Image: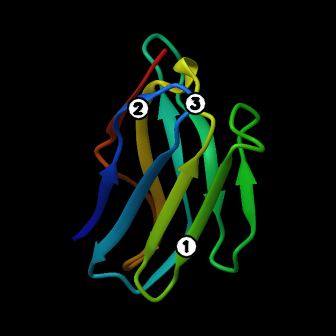
Amino acid sequence: QVELVESGGGLVQAGGSLRLSCAASGSISGVGAMGWYRQAPGKQRELVATVARGGTTTYGDSVKGRATISRDNTKNTINLQIDSLKPEDTAVYYCNAYILVLVMRSYWGQGTQVTVSS
């Protein structure tokens, strides 16, 4: 069984910073790309940032220049920091990871709410 445990989030003021963490645990043989996605009410889920096992990063256009994602392969964890927060960053943020158990597949966390007040 594999679990993605998310932490961080909550209520943040506009202009502030946010830090989210995600840890993968369970019967894991390997971990590929990990990342964060978000979904605002009435909108589709969108990419925030991903990081490959080798460290290559990808950022969504809405956070490019404001976000930094990092990972620790020894702990199967990722961290995301977003600076200069805007009210439009308000969303449920989901951790995603490609994890090898018997086969490699995508797993999702339960989501953590981030609300940015103006």
The residue labelled by disc 2 is 12
Describe the element under mark 2 as helix, strand or loop.
strand
Residue on which disc 3 sits? 15
> Label 1 to label 2, Cα distance in Å?
23 Å
Other-residue count near label 1 (Cα within 10 Å), few / some / many at <14 / 14–19 / ≥20: many
What residue type is disc 2 on? Val
Question: Disc 3 or 1, which lies upstream in sequence?
Answer: 3
Name the amino acid, label 3. Answer: Gly
Residue 4 is situated, as x and y percent measured from the top left of the image, at 32, 61
Residues under labels 3 and 1: Cα distance?
25 Å
Residue at the (49%, 66%) spot, across then down: 78
Check disc 3 and report its element: helix, strand or loop: loop
Q: Earlier in the sequence, mark 1 or mark 2?
A: 2
Question: Quick one: SS at disc 1?
Answer: strand
Q: How is colour applied across the structure in the image?
A: rainbow
Specify whether 63 is left or right of 77.
right
Say above or below: 35 vs 9: below
In the displayed structure image, the side of residue 79 where residue 59 appears, left or right: right
Answer above or below: position of 36 versus 26.
above
- Residue drawn at x 72%, y 47% is 59
Mark whose residue sits in front, 3 or 1: 3
**Quadrant hosting residue 113:** top left
Q: Seen in the image, is 28 located left or right of residue 95?
A: left
Mark 1 or mark 2, whichever is nearer to me: 2
The circle drawn on residue 71 is 1
Residue contact between numbered discs 1 and 2, judged by CB atoms under 8 Å? no
Distance (Cα) linking label 2 and label 3 = 9 Å
Q: Position of residue 10 (x, y in %)?
A: 31, 36
Specify the amino acid type for callout 1: Arg
